[in-house]
Amino acid sequence: MGRCVFRASGRNVKAKVWRVDPSEPDAKSIEEAASILRKGGVVAFPTETVYGLGAVYHMRDAVIRVFKVKRRPPDNPLILHISSFSQIYTLASEVPEAVHRLAEKFWPGPLTVVLPKTSRVPYEVTGGLEKVAVRMPAHNVALRLIEAVGDPIAAPSANLSGRPSPTTAQHVLADLGDEIDGVLDAGETLYGVESTVIDLTADPPVLLRPGAVPLEEVEKVLGKVCVPAFARGLGEAERALAPGTRYRHYSPRAQLVLVELKDYSDLSKLVDRVKRLVAENAGRGLRVGVLCTDETREHYSGLGAVVLSLGSRRDPFGIARRLYSSFREMDSLGVDVIVAEGVDERGLGLTIMNRMRKASTKRVVV
Ligand code: AMP
Ligand code: MG
């Protein structure tokens, strides 16, 4: 695909947009974006999980600007993205053998490891902590950009803090278009949810955030991993343990009522409760949306609600991938209250339930 620079239409957007091919991005666009970063700018770019908002990790003012434009609490640390394994030694003062085994299996890919930091990593990046989070993304645009910059890139998701993470460049522009220097647009991201974050400074290792790599896959390499309640989206973490997992997150503007089952083998109870909640909210004059699955969708027609299916329960990858864009779609359809169905917590289900619980304003367990 040829290089194409234009400004997004529709609103007064300052950001430069480079359309690039996801597998073979043209070198000129990458170099332009990298040069802005090297001068202390902030540029959004795709990864295989979601779009990130990047700054060169040691440029404190640029890192502070990332927090400012996202309205991100300063104690919520950023993940550092590397393009070659050796860069980890610049960032982490100890690299245990387990990291090599994890990297062998998952890098480049959506797994983030938390390790003791070196003095080169500014506290602005880590939210004041002595630990740093590192990963190598599996996306050629991200990898070429890091290479062109010549240094790791600090990048949180490129959304306004609290909003659903962006899975397209259009989502990035809708949230941050007026305030960032540019975005590399390579279309929709593959996973649509963030990386899995594992703290390797603890023994046994701790799951800080479930993500695109299922916990079970990580345990095949590490053995038992500790899963605190906050990693399931329940309760709040101690700040020092898992910063940034404490806030309402990933949320649509609409209220979100999450309906969970203790056992997902019989979905009829779920359907009954969702229908009741639709009727109650519609009765109050609210515009209601139902976020369901292919298995239950037919039960919600004729209720006067906006119905979106996240896909089949047999395809949690697809459900995770569509989750954030469905939240944004419900908002653009003017829905006041979303009634969402929960899924089984196994595999990627844990990630989906973490995001849904954190996005919810109310949770009902049947
Ligand atoms: P985001 O970049 O928005 O996907 O969020 C990054 C998340 O990674 C944070 O909210 C934390 O949960 C986790 N994280 C990043 N750095 C650290 C760190 N130094 N210690 C513990 N967790 C971290
Ligand atoms: Mg985020």
Image (spheres, rainbow, N blue to C red):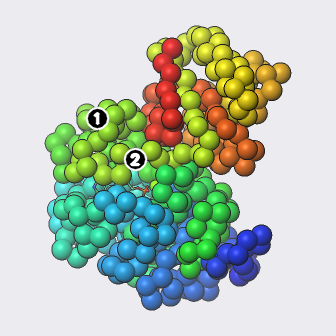
- Return the disc, 2 or 1, that comes first in the chain's sequence: 1
x%, y% of residue 235? 34, 34
Task: Tell me how far mark 2 sits from mark 1, CA to CA.
Answer: 16 Å
> Mark 1 highlights which residue?
228
Q: Is residue 260 visible?
A: yes
> Mark 2 highlights which residue?
247
Q: Helix, strand or loop at disc 2?
A: loop
Query: From what the image shows, is residue 104 above or below residue 63?
Result: above
Q: Does the residue labelled 2 lie within 8 Å of ligand 1?
A: no
Q: Helix, strand or loop at disc 1?
A: loop
Query: From what the image shows, is residue 300 above or below residue 201?
Result: above
Q: Can residue 343 be seen in this view?
A: no
Give the tally of numbered discs.
2
Q: Which of 325 and 339 is in front in this view?
A: 339
Side (left or right) of 207 relative to 257: left
Q: Nearer the viewer, residue 19 or 362?
A: 362
Query: From what the image shows, is residue 182 above or below residue 168?
Result: below
Identified by mark 2, the residue type is Tyr
- Give the residue at x 60% y 62%: 175
Q: How crowded is mark 1: few (under 14 residues within 10 Å), some or many (20 or more)?
A: some
